[in-house]
Image (cartoon, coloured by chain):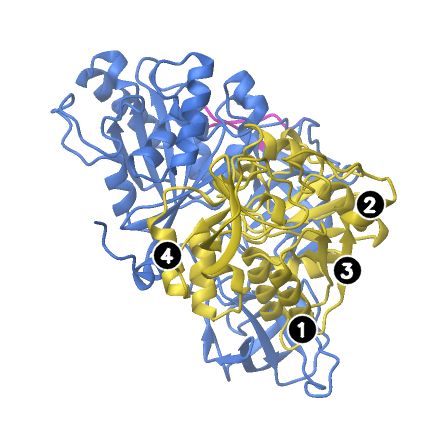
């Protein structure tokens, strides 16, 4: 809450990056609490790859209506149509990387000077070095060697025109902290996080959801499994896990026993050892 | 089978934040990798990735340092170059590690990691003994008021687990530490590579009667880091909903920086000096009877006053120091040196003012802790006692008394980078 308020006080046009995933839902909840009884004083921004789970979109629209906040949608499809980016082809094609361009376009178009993200330092090695207030140059790029020192709780959000900040209020939360908070505060989350039956196929040991735009190799057979999402992102790269967890208590027990990180099932991070760092430098979330 | 995970126990668990420091090859990353690995805090996919990378680089054993050396440049140079945060939990405690680089040009990151820590791990290579870096890091830990120091004498396997080597380092360090302000110092001989005395005790050092590093981390007393005596509430943001239902609502949002605030009490608002009554303490829809650090709350007052960000709510008979002439212990973080006469932005709690450097009173030689009368310039990684003059009065306490109202940062007027950090004397 302290960070949310610092953002509202230090920046002119902040926005909260909303993916429909649990981390961004927790952020919205924190923002709601930080400004109660006033409305959240900044819009939510969704970078839409066009390859979403339907449940996420319904959830997003209901939440926005309930809070009475503005929603900005940055569309990857539009960026493809206008030729700003070229879509990947082949079996591993994912629009995940294309989000960077769309995100930076949306930030520039809306003159956003601070984008709140749900990134946590426990997720991935490159994120472990991220600041709460992370400075981006006019190209939206991150320079890990030239980060501002961040001491105590004094946050320096001063910047030149055209530059912006990424702020990560959940930096010090772990996956378990997120679930405990959802449980404690009784926060609504999309049904995708609970067990359900879905048409899926397996690629390189990762369970992926079937969808019309998902190209499959001949040996990749679609079957029905009882699964749940551990993270929610674009369909093309969200790995699913077999699970019978139908309540928050079940999920917490499951996380406690797990031996694989949540990003371990993200197809996008398995691409190379420094996949995340490379994307971050260019201006990814 | 493991016991059923208890949400209640998890939520009640204490959190210990600690920072690690050591020179380039003291094996800091290896030690952290070892702590995580032996505490079973490494997930299988992370371990697999490290195994693959170790084999590719031709390492014979799994190189645990690769678990924490996050960035590509680090993997290339084989050194850590920024503060990396790590999280793990044992059945007894949750931990946040700020892993900071040891070599000279990145010492500013050590200060960063230390600013929020309850404990500091100081690593010493048993073959080299106490070095300049050891002194520097210990001094910074003491300057930033970290209550506990844990001195790990590492690479004991390379000195044949020799007790004399350990005792000599312990004596050297203790002689130096007598001049520091740290009350609690513990020593532990370890081998991060092999794992001796990190999580498990092995039989190589029967002469060592103390606990393992993990035991120490789990059991040191996490002192109440927060000041509960002097009520301080820096106003962060004013909440004025423009809605029918809350037409007259005017709340002052912020985080309690010290003391305890109670509903119905008389409070004083700075700088105006008005005294009024604390009508309500709101935390979203709840109304609280009292609030203390580090709670984020919203205060409502009985009188309609003109209060904005940067003002401070305190108790009438317990006000902070108010003034424009401030003396600080300053650590310089920028390669552009600071000199008397220079001007900067100064950030303190929720306030920003401009400031001019009046005087460098003395510098501190971190090897001897002696005062050096050199008033010309303060360069990167140097520490000095400095006199500042601000354009507007600040409401402050000494850093010793309150880490929040006693700390400040300086921001360059051209680049907007954070260039200096100060602890108010």
Question: Would residue B319 appear left or right of B221 to someone viewing this image?
Answer: right
Q: Are marks 3 and 1 on the same chain?
A: yes
Question: Would residue B43 appear left or right of A275 to someone viewing this image?
Answer: left
Identify the residue at image location x=78%, y=57%: A13
**Residue B23 painted magenta:** no
The foreground one among B318 and B110 is B110
Q: Colour of chain B?
A: blue
Residue A87: give x, y in percent of width and height: 76, 38
| Residue tagged 1 | A67
Q: Chain of mark 3?
A: A
The foreground one among B416 and B352 is B416
Separation of marks 4 and 3 at Cα, in angstroms: 43 Å
Residue B273 position (above or below residue B181): below
Q: Quadrant of residue B238?
A: bottom right
Furthest-front residue in this view: A218
Q: Nearer the viewer, mark 4 or mark 3?
A: 3
| Residue tagged 3 | A72
Instruction: Tell which circle, 3 or 1, labels the residue nearer the N-terminal end.
Output: 1
Q: Which mark is residue A79?
A: 2
Residue B301: give x, y in percent of width and height: 61, 81
| Residue tagged 4 | B224
Callout 1 crowding tier (Cα within 10 Å): few <14, some 14–19, many ≥20: few
Q: Quadrant of residue A56?
A: bottom right
Separation of marks 2 and 4 at Cα, in angstroms: 52 Å
Identify the residue at image location x=32%, y=57%: B13
Callout 4 crowding tier (Cα within 10 Å): few <14, some 14–19, many ≥20: few
Q: Secondary structure at mark 3?
A: strand
């Amino acid at each position: 809450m302290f960070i949310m308020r610092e953002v509202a006080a230090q920046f002119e046009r902040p926005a909260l990056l909303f993916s429909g995933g649990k981390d961004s839902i927790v952020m919205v909840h924190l923002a709601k609490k930080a400004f109660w009884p006033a409305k959240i004083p900044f819009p939510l921004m969704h970078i839409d790859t066009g390859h979403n789970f339907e449940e996420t979109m319904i959830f997003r629209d209901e939440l926005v209506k309930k809070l009475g906040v503005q929603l900005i949608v940055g569309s990857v499809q539009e960026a493809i149509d206008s030729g700003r980016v070229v879509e990947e082809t082949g079996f591993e094609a994912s629009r995940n990387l294309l989000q960077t361009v769309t995100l930076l376009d949306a930030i520039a178009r809306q003159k956003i000077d601070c984008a709140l993200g749900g990134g946590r330092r426990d997720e991935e090695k490159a994120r472990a070095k991220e600041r709460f207030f992370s400075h981006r140059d006019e190209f939206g790029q991150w320079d890990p060697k030239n980060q501002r020192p961040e001491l105590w709780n004094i946050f320096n959000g001063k910047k030149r025109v055209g530059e912006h900040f990424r702020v990560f209020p959940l930096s010090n939360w772990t996956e378990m902290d997120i679930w405990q908070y959802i449980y404690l505060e009784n926060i609504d989350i999309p049904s995708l996080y609970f067990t359900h039956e879905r048409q899926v196929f397996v690629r390189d040991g990762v369970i992926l959801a079937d969808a019309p735009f998902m190209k499959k190799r001949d040996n990749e057979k679609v079957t029905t499994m009882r699964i749940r999402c551990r993270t929610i992102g674009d369909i093309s790269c969200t790995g699913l896990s077999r699970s019978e967890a139908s309540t928050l208590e079940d999920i917490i027990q499951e996380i406690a026993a797990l031996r694989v990180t949540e990003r371990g099932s993200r197809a996008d991070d398995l691409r190379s050892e420094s996949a995340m760092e490379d994307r971050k430098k260019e201006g990814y979330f | 089978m493991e016991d059923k995970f208890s949400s209640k126990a998890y939520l009640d668990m204490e959190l210990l934040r600690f920072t690690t420091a050591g020179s380039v090859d003291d094996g800091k990353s290896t030690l952290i990798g070892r702590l995580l690995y032996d505490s079973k805090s490494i997930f299988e996919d992370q371990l697999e990735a490290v195994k693959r990378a170790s084999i590719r680089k031709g390492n014979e054993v799994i190189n645990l340092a690769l678990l924490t050396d996050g960035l590509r440049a680090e993997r290339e140079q084989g050194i850590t170059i920024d503060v990396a945060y790590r999280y793990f939990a044992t059945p007894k405690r949750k931990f946040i590690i700020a892993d900071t680089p040891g070599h000279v040009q990145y010492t500013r990151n050590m200060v960063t990691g230390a600013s929020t820590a309850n404990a500091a791990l100081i690593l010493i290579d048993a073959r080299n003994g106490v070095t300049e870096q050891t002194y520097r890091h210990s001094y910074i830990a003491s300057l930033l008021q970290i209550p506990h120091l844990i001195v790990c004498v590492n690479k004991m396997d390379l000195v044949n687990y020799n007790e004399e080597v350990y005792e000599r380092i312990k004596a050297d360090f203790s002689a130096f530490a007598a001049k520091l302000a740290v009350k609690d110092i513990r020593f532990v001989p370890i081998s991060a590579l092999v794992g001796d005395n990190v999580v498990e005790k092995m039989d190589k050092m029967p002469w060592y009667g103390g606990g393992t590093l993990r035991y120490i981390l789990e059991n040191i007393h996490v002192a109440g880091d927060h000041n509960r005596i002097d009520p301080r509430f820096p106003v962060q943001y004013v909440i004025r909903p423009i809605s029918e239902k809350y037409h007259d609502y005017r709340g002052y949002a912020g985080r309690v920086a010290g003391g305890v605030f109670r509903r119905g009490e008389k409070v004083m608002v700075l700088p105006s000096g008005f005294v009024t009554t604390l009508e309500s303490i709101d935390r979203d829809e709840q109304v609280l009877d009292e609030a203390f650090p580090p709670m984020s709350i919203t205060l409502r007052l009985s009188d309609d006053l003109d209060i904005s960000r940067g003002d401070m709510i305190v108790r009438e008979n317990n006000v902070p120091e108010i003034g424009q002439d401030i003396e600080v212990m300053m650590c310089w973080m920028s390669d552009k040196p600071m000199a008397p006469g220079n001007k900067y932005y100064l950030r303190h709690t929720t306030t920003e003012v401009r400031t001019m450097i009046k005087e460098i009173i003395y510098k501190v030689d971190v090897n001897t802790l002696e005062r050096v009368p050199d008033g010309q310039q303060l360069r990167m990684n140097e520490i000095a006692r400095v006199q500042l003059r601000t354009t507007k009065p600040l409401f402050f306490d000494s850093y010793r008394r309150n880490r929040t109202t006693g700390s400040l940062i300086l921001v360059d007027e051209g680049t907007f980078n954070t260039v200096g950090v100060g602890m108010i004397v």
